[in-house]
Image (tube, grey):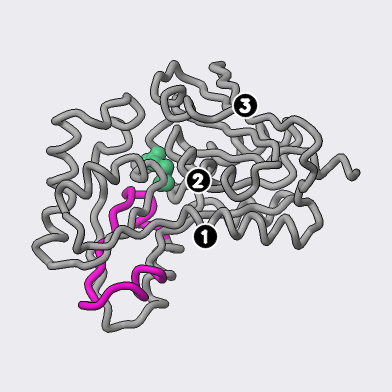
Amino acid sequence: MNTIKRNPIGFFDSGIGGTSIWQEVNKLLPNENTIYLADSKNAPYGQKSKEKILEYCIKNTEFLLNKNAKIIVVACNTATTNAINYLRENYDIPFIGIEPAIKKAGLVTKNKKIGVLATKGTINSKLFEKTSTKIDHSIKIIEQVGYGLVELIENGEIDSSKMEKLIYECLDPMLKENIDALVLGCTHYAYLVPQIKKIIGNHIQIVDSGLAVAKQTQRVLNGVNLLNSSTSEKTFNHFYINKKSKILVEILKNYNPVEVIEKEF
Ligand code: DGL
């Protein structure tokens, strides 16, 4: 068997948010080995300059290439919208990116009003602007920066009253506009779905990109003949994180085999 097929799929995010994407990929491609890099020390990326985000993305890519990643999933909207073009032009492996699922929301909305909750870095990016103009022009997009949400998630304060208040403040302007679809444009926000639903109820559809990213990863690996379909060997899933974190271990507690490695990088 081609040993490169055994090489891991690499993932990176500014922190633990991209594990929501890792979970989708792991569900769809359980035979694949994986390496995940959580750059929690530098989170959040969302408020940083494009140059700084690019610098982190290059460092993360080099780290994963040193671990023999055969493909890299940029499991972060902010990193994708600011750096994926550069990464694709400068490295010789495939990159899978993630963008807010505006197109999908455009298909589910009935009243043509969709909300997008994302980081400042994503909303201000050129790629986001380009995608937004590609959908039906009669659809109104109400954008909202999720100020403070990533920081609280990274601290494990998902169920706190502080979180509840912040989410409410983010969603209120969209609710006032009567949206009927809400795009979660940051991989961290997948961990806020129960809290968000408490505020928006069931009549607003939540849209994210997780499954689409997993399917795209499968398609691209298949296209370059690097899908690992072998069931005879043990798989590994290594999670590197450069900050002490209880939340990462908590998120992964039902997955096996999984190894969390806390180390400075
Ligand atoms: N998880 C991220 C995203 O999808 C980045 C959040 C941040 O670091 O600000 O945008």
* Quadrant occupied by the C terminus: top right
Residue plotted at (36% across, 45% down): 190
Q: Is tag 3's residue or tag 1's residue first in the polypeptide sequence?
A: 1
Residue type at numbered disc 3: Pro
Provide the secondary structure element on which disc 1 rests: helix
Q: Is residue 99 above or below residue 69?
A: below
Res 245 label? none
Res 212 label? 1
Could you tell me residue 91's position as x and y percent? 72, 49
Residue 129 in view in this figure: yes
Q: Is tag 2's residue or tag 1's residue first in the polypeptide sequence?
A: 2
Q: Is tag 2's residue or tag 3's residue first in the polypeptide sequence?
A: 2
Residue type at numbered disc 2: Ile
Q: Which residue is mark 3?
A: 257
Tell me the CA gap for discs 2 and 1. 10 Å
* Quadrant occupied by the N terminus: top right
